Amino acid sequence: MRYARTRFARTLATAGCGLLVATAVLSGCGLKSGSPLVDDVVPGSIGKGLPLEGASLIVTSKNFSEQIILGSMIGLAFKAAGAEVLDRTNIQGSIGAREAIKSGQADAMYEYTGTAWITYLGHDEPITDPLAQWRAVRDEDARNGIVWLPPSSLDNTYTLAINQANNAKYHLKTLSDVAALSNSDPSAVTLCVENEFASRDDGLPGMQKAYGMHIPASNIQKMDAGIVYTQVAKGTCLLGEAFTTDGRIKAMDLDTMADNKHFFPNYNAAPVINGKTFDRYPAIAALLDPISKRLTTQIAQQLNARVDVDGQDPHDVAKDWLIAEGFIKKG
């Protein structure tokens, strides 16, 4: 899952290298892991003319399935366009990957607008309009030497999930519907959440306040994120904390609640590029823009399910999708 949008994360984001060592695979704020991409790929609809020929670029990502898939997409796009690519995806936590891009230890990754706005840039209130949120992040982060390319509609934000058998009884569609049920029948609403989400102002407490939910503490079970989905699917909890792009939502036939009051920030994925790298290789924008335009929340669910449900390798999932979409071809 994304690195948490917490005050602790915000503190780390503004701290020095010493604090980063504990949360990322860094040595003196330099990435240690990585291997060259050896995939034999050539241009499809992107990369024609090999605009990155002669470039040596490093891609990175955080350490969860969606991020590794997205980071692999960038690396494969660069490779097809002629670059030599070092794969340093799967870095623990947001802060390590962020600092790598900022410092020039890595050149490119996909990041989430809400994470940048709240965790890195220190704002408390999200911007409701997704494009306005991206523009605000783009403009403010430019002073940090980071270029934000146009975002995808892929929005990896919070939601509550319910299995379809239970929802046939309650017909819940929005978080306001959940609030109404919690007030009319408090005993009906049982909730499975992570420990962190249960205690954060931008998690369960804030959501309950914003929507006027009244869920008894005895009805809230705290557990590991992965277990939440299985417990909701089994009906152990009526509702559970979920991420909108998680592949288990569709695989387990879960319904999700719309955040109709826009309490949670937008977490649209967009490529972020080290500024010096972008100045040297502006053709990166033309390579990645078509990919971002195609990425949606639903596509992310499908790709994530191939990893988290079917057990496929994230790099292979990214490569297969890019080829199927015609962005790149096998060499």
Image (cartoon, rainbow, N blue to C red):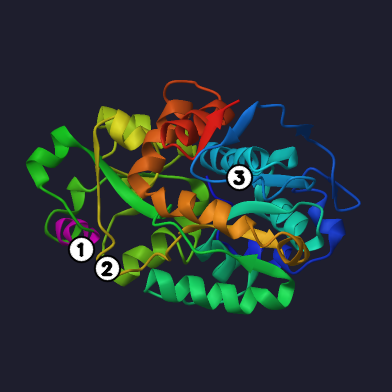
Question: Do the residues under discs 1 and 2 have CB atoms within 8 angstroms?
Answer: yes
Q: Residue furthest front?
A: 49
Question: Do the residues under discs 3 and 2 have CB atoms within 8 angstroms?
Answer: no
Q: Looking at the picture, tell me which residue is in the foreground, 295 or 265.
A: 295
Measured in 3D between alpha carbons, the distance from the residue under mark 3 to the one under mark 1, in whole angstroms, is: 38 Å
Residue for badge 3: 74
Q: In this view, does 168 lie to the left or right of 191?
A: left
Q: Which residue lies furthest to the top in this view?
A: 311
Q: Position of residue 280 (x, y in %)?
A: 76, 62
Of the numbered discs 1 and 2, the one sitting upstream in the chain is 1
Residue for badge 2: 211
State the image quarter where residue 42 is shown: top right
Residue for badge 1: 176
Count neighbours of disc 3 (C-alpha within 10 A) and say few if under 14, some if 14 to 19, many if 20 or more. many
Of the numbered discs 3 and 2, the one sitting upstream in the chain is 3
Residue range corresponding to the magenta coloring = 175-181
Measured in 3D between alpha carbons, the distance from the residue under mark 3 to the one under mark 2, in whole angstroms, is: 39 Å
Reply yes or no: does residue 316 show up in magenta: no
Count neighbours of disc 2 (C-alpha within 10 A) and say few if under 14, some if 14 to 19, many if 20 or more. some
Q: Where is residue 309 in the image (x, y as percent from the top left)?
A: 42, 25
